[in-house]
Amino acid sequence: MTLSAVAAVVVFAAAYVLIASEKVNRTAVALGGAAAMVVIGVVRGGDVFFSEETGIDWNVIFLLLGMMIIVGVLRQTGIFEFVAIWAAQKARARPFRMMALLIVITAVASALLDNVTTVLLVAPVTLLLCERLALAPVPFLLAEAMASNIGGAATLIGDPPNIIIASRAGLTFNDFLVNLAPVVVVLIAVFVGLAWLLWGRRLRYDPERAEAVMALTPRETITDQRLLRRMLVVLGLVLLGFLTHNLTHLEPSLVALLGAGAAVVLSRLPSDDYLEDVEWETLLFFAGLFVMVGALVNAGVISELAKTLTSTIGDHYLPAAQGVLVGSAVLSGVVDNIPYVATMAPLVHDLVGPGGGLPPAQQSLWWALALGADLGGNATAIGASANVVITGIAKRNDHPISFWTFTKYGLVVTAVTIGICVPYVWLRYFVWG
Amino acid sequence: MRAQDLVEQVPTVTRETTGAEAARVIAEYRLSGLVVADDAGVPIAVIPGSQLFGLVLPRWVRDDRKLVHAYDEKGADDLCRRLNESTIGDLLDDEKLTASKPPAVLPEDTLLEIASAMDDAHSPVILVKEEDGTYRGVLTMSRVLAAIATAAGQDSDLVRRRLERDIILRGTPHESGPTREAP
């Protein structure tokens, strides 16, 4: 290994430890690490901005930006609040039925939007419902955070790791739907059953309290029907744009940006309203991360690792895929799954190549990475951004969720969901091929 | 004009005062904010009146304003009763108001210094303290603005008459009616 490669590994490892420790702001660490890579000379200025392989992945950044703007406009409509309260009333305010519906709603919303936004929208209305029913909201909030991580695994746009994998592997929205959505549907059904065992059977129904939920007026939360209609059309067209990639050849990032533009023009909202939902810090975190990982690629660290792994794996893709699945789940519980996938994606790329036209056995590594990273995020309170957000909301509302409370349930859910994915990967890519 | 010419004495509340009692103080004395004092009567915080809404509105509603529309009248009244259960201390802890020094000016400070301090603190009430920290009273936004208007050459009687005439001209015939006349 060259001196510059050693220096790149040291900078990368130090940044990773700092990100995992959560003692320093992760964006500052990622940008600091990127700057260090430039200073030690493993990354050139031109690569940072213009290299598709080793620079900032603009597809990922602009897809995230576009979706954040669309969500920023969509949330002004009150549709999420309406759906959640409507579902609670459909469940006749019976606690477990309500929990099951909220799990499904969160999972579906999370597949179409990003996880953090979904839990930010669903948590306040959950607190309202629990206050009306005099129920402890913690089980509901835990269930929603986990449902968002599971549901987000179903689509290209559902979870940031999927966006990175799609961009690096050249996988389309439809590839994700075909390969991951079926197993996610099964996982959500199983998770509803798990939720009954973990929390649901202890929830008590109080008919008098239920009346307070039935008296809520969900329609009132939709304050601008015209905006809602327009935004549903925009969201529908954006999804259509993702689905018809094979015909239009429009990159997901372009589809999202066109959707964002349409949302801004049609809503006529002041810029503060929709820009408030853009997480600039997250976008900068991604940019810094891409530069750091690009530096490892430039320095030859990734290709060296890939060579070693290739000689170890050989043609044994089944144990490799299962190893990536379980290993990613374990590591994603310990460190944020975004930097993990950003690092692993070029490695898997070197191992098996871009995902689109690969034979099923080789392609399985990409799907194992996505499933492992997305579902592994459920293991601990810091495993995924949605978990951090939900524990923060719970604390602000005087219902703190300790790290160990989250982990106690998170480990069970991760073990069961990964336990289902292990035979799925085997059957889907190696038996039925 | 200086702060000492405008100083007022207003009732103070303590950390133990309930939200409902504090709301009453604001309503009865037509205040725009509250002075919170410790057991020794020393002011520890100034709360703009609008922050009392924070005791009525649950945090989840403050996180997602659309949710207020989901409550029916009974539900809304239920939430208003939260004012009896929460105290000014809860609000101070929640908003971390005690962490910052309550805004204050010196008795000899000018109108410009007072305006700057109120603008900086975004507070409709500000303390007047001696250099040694002795509390002299408060300045309220309405009184400070009246003093500024006077300094700007606005005649209060003239303005009042003009405003009353505007109200009458804009009001419905039933409201303004024959019982009131424009001056």
Image (spheres, rainbow, N blue to C red):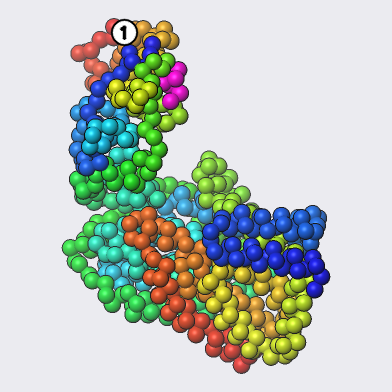
* Magenta stretch, residue numbers: B112-117
Q: Is B177 displayed left or right of A287 in the figure?
A: left
Is A70 placed above or below A88 here?
above
- Pick whichever, A350 or A192, lies toward us: A350
Q: Identify the residue position indicated by label 1 in the image.
A: B157
Image x and y of residue A52, in percent: 76, 63
Residue at the location (56% across, 55% down)? A25
Q: What secondary structure characterizes most of the magenta part? A: helix
Give, as a three-letter code, the residue at label 1.
Asp
From this view, report whether residue A257 is shown above or below residue A333: above
Classify the position of the N terminus of chain A by image quarter: bottom right
Q: Percent position (x, y) of residue B68?
A: 33, 48
Q: Chain of mark 1?
A: B
Which residue is situated farthest in the bottom direction here?
A431
Residue B66: horizontal and vertical position, in percent?
A: 38, 49
| Quarter of the image where one finds residue A196 | bottom left
Identify the residue at image location x=64%, y=89%: A318
Residue beneath the point at 58% across and 45% down: A265
Q: Is residue A429 visible?
A: yes
Q: Is residue A348 shown left or right of residue B160?
A: right
**Mark 1 crowdedness (10 Å alpha carbons): few <14, some 14-19, many ≥20:** few
